[in-house]
Image (cartoon, rainbow, N blue to C red):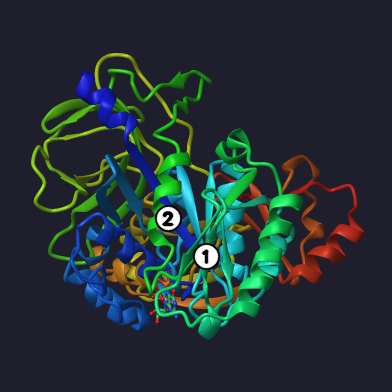
Amino acid sequence: MDNFQEQLKNRRTFAIISHPDAGKTTLTEQLLLHGGVIREAGTVKGRGAKKLASSDWMAIEQQRGISVTSSVLQFDYDGKRINILDTPGHEDFSEDTYRTLMAVDSVVMVVDAAKGIEPQTKKLFEIVSQRGIPVFTFFNKIDRDARSPLDLVDELETVLGIQAYPMNWPIGSGQILQGIYDLQKDELIPFKNASSNPEVVAEGEDEVELVKDAGNEFDEDAIAHGKLTPVFFGSALANFGVTEFLREYLKYAPAPVPVATIDGSLVEPSDTQFTGFVFKIQANMDPRHRDRIAFLRIVSGEFDRGMDVTLQRTGKKMRLSNVTQFMAEERENVQTAVPGDIIGIYDTGNFQIGDTIYSGKKSVEFPDLPTFTPEYFNKVIAKDVMKQKSYHKGIAQLVQEGTIQLYQSWSGTEYIIGAVGQLQFEVFKFRMENEYNVEIAFEPIGSKVARWINPDQLDEKMASSRNLLVRDRYDQPVFLFENKFALNWFKDKYPNIDLEEKM
Ligand code: GDP
């Protein structure tokens, strides 16, 4: 048991959020190099993979495993065991990206220092900030010409509404990068091969003094609640500032935290009862293998292969034997996992996103994961009217799995599906054809701004071509506005109507 408590204390589970091309993959690789998991950069995932068209992406999925194995990466460093959960970006950006953020204890935000806060970073940050978990900021690519660090920090604070605490400070950037000034140790860490430039150094020293005098107070409690973000500068590609970042990150990032159940009680990670929740279900895209993998975040207790558990929603008892663990290769003692760890359970259709499982007799239920407001919508049409039954079944199952969100026209005659990323539609189409043998077509209705309306206030006459009235899968009314202008127009016209945005 001591061993369990010890392991628990040393777990760190995080995700990296960033805008595409900011350097998430490169930083991940450097971290894995630090952990000795890989020996050279460029091996994490087919670097070209994200540049491929989505049809190619599905071919890759079919070969199985690529996105599954890179979904959770584990390594050891400095006595800690670290889990990095991948947040798919680019074309495969989907609700999974958001849900993964529900399964981590902290977040690393990678920002391109030449570009500053970009849209996808902001979106992901907003999801994270609602959870109030710690965020660590890494301004990357200072080996290239970067924006002024004062500017970057100011933008971070104003655009994201979080206070910043610089842990180090770049002295110059690009060709004239001198190094980073470590504000904890009060010393300059020189950039290798920097040709000395006294002017840049003097300017940097002035800034460092300014930051020391006028900056925010260091406040661990504020960091723990996501109100203050420790800020680092560096270059993932040049492996500069990465070690310092990792060291400080491990100092302040939390070990697995307690999770509240729906009745408000807290499940402590150190509880002996095994509990966890499913935050993602990955289907096998190969039609010959219908199995799926349910990703479970362990909340409490110790996982042992072959243990018996109950699936809370259905009461079904099951044995956890067919399980993959996301661990670095060549590790011994692979039979157990502790809170903070992720296990992948092979599933033949028992699990849904948000499900709780537990060992023993005491029933435990974690709250549902939030749903996210989709931005893209399509009408779905079955090409073959003879296959209505499989069509409805397929839609129902894929919606349950969280592949896509389902709406119906208010009259109930048409299906409309919504997603946060475009690829979700293609995955949906592909799976309808391959798993349910139903050909479908889409009729795009473009991007929409979805808002839930209080059913008591609904008057069908409020709907128009600029704000479609639909119902979600719980029969709640939703307006799909053509754009923000249509939304504002509506708000002006009906100032007393409550419109709600999901997360
Ligand atoms: P991701 O889309 O966020 O995963 O970004 P990648 O890690 O794939 O990086 C995008 C591009 O930026 C690649 O060409 C990287 O080699 C490059 N890159 C990443 N980090 C750095 C850095 O610190 N300095 C420079 N100069 N380039 C970088």
Depth order, front residue of 89/288:
89
- Local packing at callout 1 (Cα closer than 10 Å; few below 14, some 14-19, many 20+) is many
Please state the horizontal and vertical placement of residue 68, each as a whole percent of the image. 25, 59
User: Image point 29% across, 53% down: which residue?
Assistant: 72
- Whether the residues at callouts 2 and 1 have beta carbons within 8 Å, the answer is yes
Q: Quadrant of ligand 1?
A: bottom left
User: Image point 23% across, 25% down: which residue?
Assistant: 4
Depth order, front residue of 406/174:
174
Left or right, 138 with respect to 396, comes to right
Left or right, 350 with respect to 136, comes to left
Q: Quadrant of residue 434?
A: bottom left
Residue under label 1: 180
Residue type, numbered disc 2: Glu
Residue type, numbered disc 1: Ile
Residue under label 2: 244
User: Image point 27% across, 54% down: which residue?
Assistant: 73
Give SS at disc 2.
helix
Depth order, front residue of 355/28:
28
Mark earlier in primary sequence (2, 1): 1
Spatial CA span between label 2 and label 1: 10 Å
